[in-house]
Amino acid sequence: MKRNKVIAGNWKLHKSNTEAQQLANQIKIRSTDIKNTDIILCPPFTALTVIYDVVKDSAIGLGAQNMYWEKSGAFTGEINAEMIKSTGAGYVIIGHSERRQYFAETDETVNKKIKAALDEGLKPIVCVGESLDQRETGITAQIIETQVTGALAGLNEQQMAEIIIAYEPVWAIGTGKTASPEQAQEVHAQIRSLVNKQFGDAVSENIRIQYGGSVKAENAEILLSQPDIDGALVGGACLKAETFLPIIQAAEKL
Ligand code: 13P
């Protein structure tokens, strides 16, 4: 089963609008030869419209990093799916481990956000991953199962076609420690089989599962050539065109 690779950059809390515009421009200009790999930029909310203006005439996709599930109301500081859609974005990262860790997101809130995103026609990039402590105590598979089934509860096959899953072991995020290709592949295969159990062959064969956690030019190819790794969700290395483009090129070669 050949699935197009998908490389997304999670800019996290970085880039003013001027910097964002410059970076998006560089990525656009230098990725015109990329044909088989999907590129998605996920800047802060404040830069979404600015970047949409840069990428709207290209194949580069745009995503937000979070959203709230309510449609409107007295929720100071929150952003809903419709607002994200109105910037031109087509994707939204949901349940990143930093949101789970620092902003008390749970499998239940992740599930609500996914449903609200889908209702508005946004494609969710759903993040799961175990902590170092959980890996060391040997409960990785259990944690992944809980997070995946919790996130996807109540979805149908049609909705699943819109979803990307990102496996990001928390201990590999921003630490320079990457999961070995074998460690990552093992969890990716588990995620695909969980999706298979719940939604069947067609959905599990088509769903794209990204790896995230210290992905860089040096390790991209070996990670992306694993059978169940269909892309990368990149943090630190996506903040400069020089470090992000080689990851995209590695995916394109495979
Ligand atoms: P790093 O690539 O900086 O480890 O971040 C990964 C990540 O959290 C992407 O969402």
Image: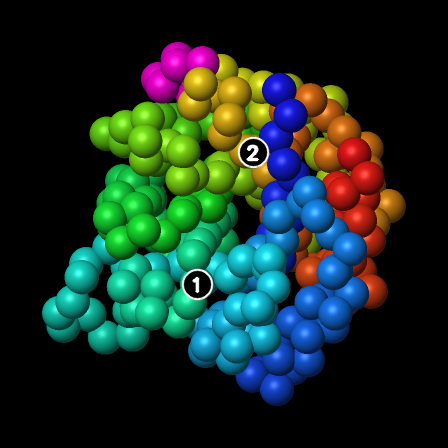
Residue range highlighted in magenta = 195-201
Q: Residue 139 in the image: x percent, y percent?
A: 51, 22
Residue 192 visible in rendering = no
> Quadrant location of residue 190?
top right
Q: Secondary structure at mark 2?
A: strand
Q: Secondary structure at mark 1?
A: loop
Which numbered disc covers residue 213?
Answer: none
* Magenta span: chief secondary structure: helix
Picture quarter with the N terminus: top right
Residue ranking furthest to the left? 73
Q: Nearer the viewer, mark 2 or mark 1?
A: 1
Question: Label 1 is placed on what type of residue?
Answer: Ala
Q: Nearer the viewer, residue 102 or 160?
A: 160
Question: Label 2 is placed on what type of residue?
Answer: Ile
Say which residue label 1 marks: 89
Q: Residue at x 40, y 39 (%)?
A: 162
Q: Nearer the viewer, residue 252 or 234?
A: 252
Q: Residue at x 61, y 86 (%)?
A: 18
Relative to 250, say whether 194 is above or below. above
Magenta includes 26? no
Q: Residue at x 27, y 64 (%)?
A: 82
Relative to residue 152, is residue 172 drawn left or right? right
Which numbered disc covers residue 209?
Answer: 2
Picture quarter with the C terminus: top right
> Quadrant location of residue 251?
top right
Relative to residue 1, is residue 153 drawn left or right? left
Q: Which of marks 1 and 2 precedes in the sequence?
A: 1
